[in-house]
Image (tube, rainbow, N blue to C red):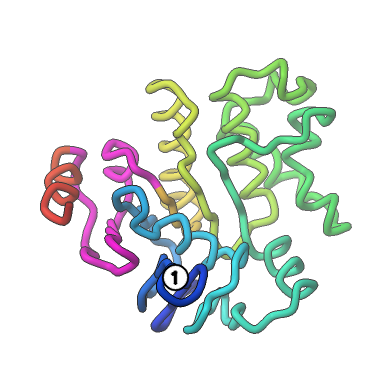
Amino acid sequence: MNIVSTADLRRTYGEGETAVHALAGVTLEFPSGQFTAIMGPSGSGKSTLMHLLAGLDKPSSGSVKVDGHEIAGLHDTGLTMLRRERFGFVFQSFNLVPVLTAEENIKLPMTLAGREVDQEWFDRLVDTVGLRDRLTHRPSELSGGQQQRVAVARALVHRPAVLFADEPTGNLDSRSSEEVLNLLRQAVDEFHQTVIMVTHEAAAAAIADRIVILSDGQVVHDGAGTDAEGVLDLMKAVG
C-alpha cells in the first residue's frame, strides 16, 4: 500500500523568462513502512518536493496523494487537519515550543487536536528516545541531540501515517546525528512507520531503505539503499 504518491508533480516559481521550474514532472510512490531518503545538489528540488508532499506548499500542477487524500485541492482548513492528524514532522531547527517542558512538547499534537494521550504509547516512546529523566526540562535546558529526540517523539506520538524529516541531523554533532537516525530507523522497523527524509548527508541517507535523487527538478535515481560510500558514488554519478 502506498501511503504517499505523486503524479507528474510540477512546481514553478515566477513567470515567463524568469520562471524557475523547481519540480518538472515528478512521479513517485512511497509504500507503507518504508524509509526513503531524498537527496540532490542544492537547487535540485528536494526541499520543494518535501514541502509539496507535506502540504506546506501547493503544486503548480500534478497530483499529491497522502493516506488516500488528494491534498493538492484541499482548502487550508482541510490541509491543517490532515497535517495535524496524519503527518509527523522533524525539522533541522527542532521547532520546539520554548515555554513548554519536554513532556508537553511531545504531547503537543494530541493537545492541539483535543485528543487523549495513549499513556502506554507515550511511555514506550519516551523510553525509546531515552528521555525519561528529561521530561520536566524545557528546550533551553536540553542539548541539541536531546531536543531533536523530543522532536522525534512528538512526531510519533499521534501515530501519523507518514513522518517527514527535513535535514533532521543538520544541526547535530556526529554522535547526536547517529542517535536520531537510529531512532528514525527504529520507528520504521519496530513501529512500522513510513519515513520520508530529505538530507544532503551520505551517512544519513545510508540508513534508508531507498534513495531517491533529484537534479534540476527531476528524478535521476530511484533505487535501494546502500552504504555511505555507495551514496557518495551515486551523487557523483548524477552530479
Against 26, is 105 above or below? Answer: above
Q: Quadrant of residue 32?
A: bottom left
For the N terminus, the image quarter is bottom left
Against 36, is 79 above or below? Answer: below
Residue at (47% x, 72% y) in the render? 12
Residue at (71% x, 64% y) in the render? 85
Q: Quadrant of residue 23?
A: bottom left
* Along the line of sight, the residue nearer the viewer: 40 or 227: 40
Number of marks: 1
Left or right of 48: which side holds 8? Answer: left
Against 61, is 33 above or below? Answer: above
Residue at (64% x, 84% y) in the render? 73
**Residue 42 visible in the displayed image:** yes
Q: Tell me the element at label 1.
A: loop
At which x and y percent is residue 116? Answer: 85, 54
Please check the rendered image and state whether residue 108 is part of the magenta-colored stretch, yes or no: no
Q: Quadrant of residue 207?
A: top left
Left or right of 177: which side holds 64? Answer: right
Dot 1 alpha-carbon crowd within 10 angstroms: few under 14, some 14 to 19, many 20 or more:
few
Residue at (68% x, 47% y) in the render? 121
At which x and y percent is residue 56? Answer: 62, 62
* Along the line of sight, the residue nearer the viewer: 2 or 47: 47
Against 229, is 173 above or below? Answer: above
**Residue 30 visible in the displayed image:** no
Left or right of 80: which side holds 48? Answer: left
At which x and y percent is residue 27? Answer: 36, 78
Residue type, label 1 = Ala
Left or right of 141: which side holds 211? Answer: left
Segment tinted magenta in the rendering: 199-228
At which x and y percent is residue 227? Answer: 19, 42
* Along the line of sight, the residue nearer the viewer: 57 or 81: 57
- Residue, disc 1: 19
